Image: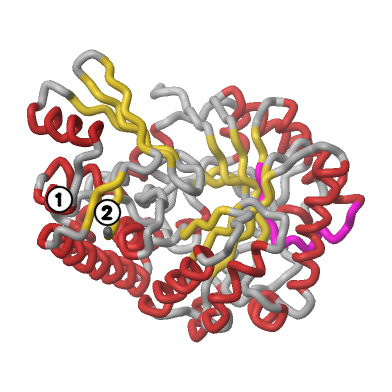
Amino acid sequence: MGEIFNIESLRWEVEEGCNLQCLHCFIGNSRPQELKRLTLEEEKKVVSTLCKSGLKEIYFTTKEPLIHPNIIELIKFCTDLDIACSVVTNGIALCDKVFVEELLNSGVVAVSISLEGATEETNDLIRGKGSFKKAIKGIYNLYEISMQSSRPIIINIQMTLNKFNYKECESIPELINAMPIDTLAIGDISNTGNARENSEIILSNEEFLDGCRKINKAYKELRIKKYTLIFKSLLPWENLLFNLLYDLNQFTYVPNCSVKTKRYSLMPDGKLVPCISLLHCDSEIVSVEFDKIVSGEIREKEFENYINNISQVSDKVYQNSCSGCYFENRCFLCPAMLFNEGERIKATERCTKAKNLFMREIDKCIKSMEYKLTLDALFLEFHYNQVKLTKYFDEGGISSKYYSMEDKAVSKIIGKLSQGHMNGIMLKNEFVRELLFEGFIKVQKG
């Protein structure tokens, strides 16, 4: 019969409607047909079934989950099953204080609100007139009511850089610092959905990275930082380069598509698919219907063959540009790029350029006595013949890895690490470079 289906995390595309028409929406109006919405009882049945398969968290996402008629009761039902619920929203519905009260009572743990600029003018060019003021009002309603009722909640802002807000990148950190939020996540625009028809708003590779640099510079200049800044669209070598050039301590996120990590997408009609992004570009995408899910007949093999096939195609497509890369065996770019040549080329060009620049900087560090290797927020634990390195990053990320102390090269470097005797010249050592690539050590001047 095959291995029993297991799923811990789910993206629930619970609502196909939206109260905005954003120029950059990656879904846009690309639904092949209007989907039949499940009843509340059917939705509960899906949740109950998947809960038995190990479901622990749900992200209610596209298009606009908070306009779904049963969203409050649905979140409450999930919460009662010990499933952590997060919502990604445009914030319009949060203008209603009564609704916000109900949302907080439902047990939601985090809300991510989308903004597209530091001003009403730039944001509304992307999201529509009046959307900026409503989103800001929603943020404050969420914070104030959560504080009054002693129900703390994580409030995040998501922002994509575009042609309109690019000119105000330096202003963004200060604006956000005045808001009661926890995290600002900066991303880029994918040339899919509505963005295909509005490609003039998409930044070039150079503009996007320059925008990130400007935002980071302004963020570092804040005297008191009240939120955490994350660059969610930086590729691994870009992240390492930013950490090196701008003295950051950000976790190096290695792309690993939700398809590979089994965070599948549940559609409004109860159909389970590997990912909503693939639904509109891959005619051979696999899916499991509602009836099969609730009957408990779903098995791991339903998705295994599809995932294996798309992984093989991905490996073949990227073999020339990614062969020999340190992250080669871990990195899995969004498979939707396999069907979008422009996005695929854009990603590989960005990564290759960043890698070359990073390695050039490392060569400088090796040749100069001005650089030192630091161990900020790094902890070493010794366990018999092993050492465990644990690094804590600014945005809350944690990275841990074990190394064998029986390896003489490792043992020697770990000894120097524990004594703090590290300089840039040591980057000639292959193991030291690995520690840098993994984010365990930093390079600083002086």
249 vs 154, left or right, is left
Image position, residue 56 (x, y; %)? 58, 30
Image position, residue 252 (x, y; %)? 36, 50
Quadrant position of residue 421: top left
Question: Can residue 370 be seen at all in this image of the molecule?
Answer: yes
> Mark number for residue 427?
1
Tag 1 and tag 2, C-beta contact below 8 Å = yes
> Mark number for residue 443?
2
Image position, residue 399 (x, y; %)? 38, 37
Question: Can residue 269 be seen at all in this image of the molecule?
Answer: no
User: Could you tell me which quadrant the C terminus lies in?
Assistant: bottom left
Residue farthest toward the bottom in the current orientation of the protein: 200
Q: Secondary structure at mark 1?
A: helix
Q: Residue at x 50, y 63 (%)?
A: 220
N-terminal of the pair, mark 1 or mark 2, is 1
Check if residue 281 falls in the magenta segment. no
224 vs 303, left or right, is right
Q: Residue at x 58, y 33 (%)?
A: 293
Image position, residue 14 (x, y; %)? 67, 49
User: Could you tell me which quadrant the N terminus lies in?
Assistant: top left
Q: Which region shows up in magenta? A: 86-97
Query: Which amino acid does the dot numbered 2 rest on?
Result: Val
103 in relation to 315, above or below: above
184 or 378, which lies in front? Answer: 378
Q: Residue at x 57, y 46 (%)?
A: 11
> Mark number for residue 12?
none
Query: Which amino acid does the dot numbered 1 rest on?
Result: Leu
Q: What colouring does the structure picture have? A: secondary structure
